[in-house]
Amino acid sequence: MEQTSNTALLVMEMQEGILTMMPEATSAITENIARAIAGARHYNILVIYVLIGFRDNVPALSQRELKGFLANKAHSATMNMEEFMKIHPDLTPRNGEITIVKRRVSAFTGSDLEVILRSSGIQHIVLTGISTSGVVLSTLREAADKDYRLTVLLDCCTDPDEKIHNILITRIFPDQAEVLTVDEWCNWW
């Protein structure tokens, strides 16, 4: 039987502001992630929601930042960040579940994720979210460098570029993580 007390499920960037950029993927991915969350809760696995968000006028982004962030800085500076960061209603956290706000691509950068994982005794991280080539890839790489055991739920991730998603899931991620479907993961125990 797989140990669950040292495992955390990360639900990354499943927020309204991100999902509106990928409306064709919203239904399938939210349904799959909802099943992953239900499985995690059933097995008493820690569920952590990771959101990207910025202060008003986006002071944390400088001219040296990543192209993707810079392209959105002007737009981000005028948007209602509270609305942008709302978690999809089908994935609403329960009382006591942790929500983390990050400031960069990786879930670790600009957040207290590592402090929470270490203080909770987490050694195994299960990754889900949007986008596969963004937060999932960056978090996987950083978590691998930090010696976490990793699982990626392939049908709980999506990307604007399906080809890149498939390359990451089939060729890149298996070098550092176990890649499973949500059904395989939920039936693992």
Image (cartoon, rainbow, N blue to C red):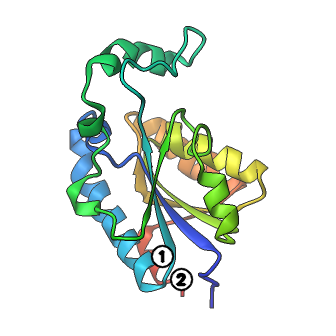
Q: Is residue 176 left or right of residue 52?
A: right
For residue 22, say whether it is visible. no
**Quarter where residue 20 is shown:** top left
| x and y percentages locating residue 172 in the rendered image | 64, 46
* Amino acid found under the numbered disc labelled 1: Glu
Q: Residue at x 52, y 22 (%)?
A: 60
Distance of mark 1 from mark 2, alpha carbons? 6 Å
* Amino acid found under the numbered disc labelled 2: Trp
Q: Quadrant of the C terminus?
A: bottom right
Q: Is residue 139 left or right of residue 60?
A: right
Extreme residue in the top direction: 63
| x and y percentages locating residue 131 in the rendered image | 44, 41
**Quarter where residue 182 is shown:** bottom left
Residue designated by label 2: 188
What is the number of the mark on residue 184? 1
Q: Secondary structure at mark 2?
A: loop
The reply to whether the C-beta atoms of the residues labelled 1 and 2 are less than 8 Å apart is yes
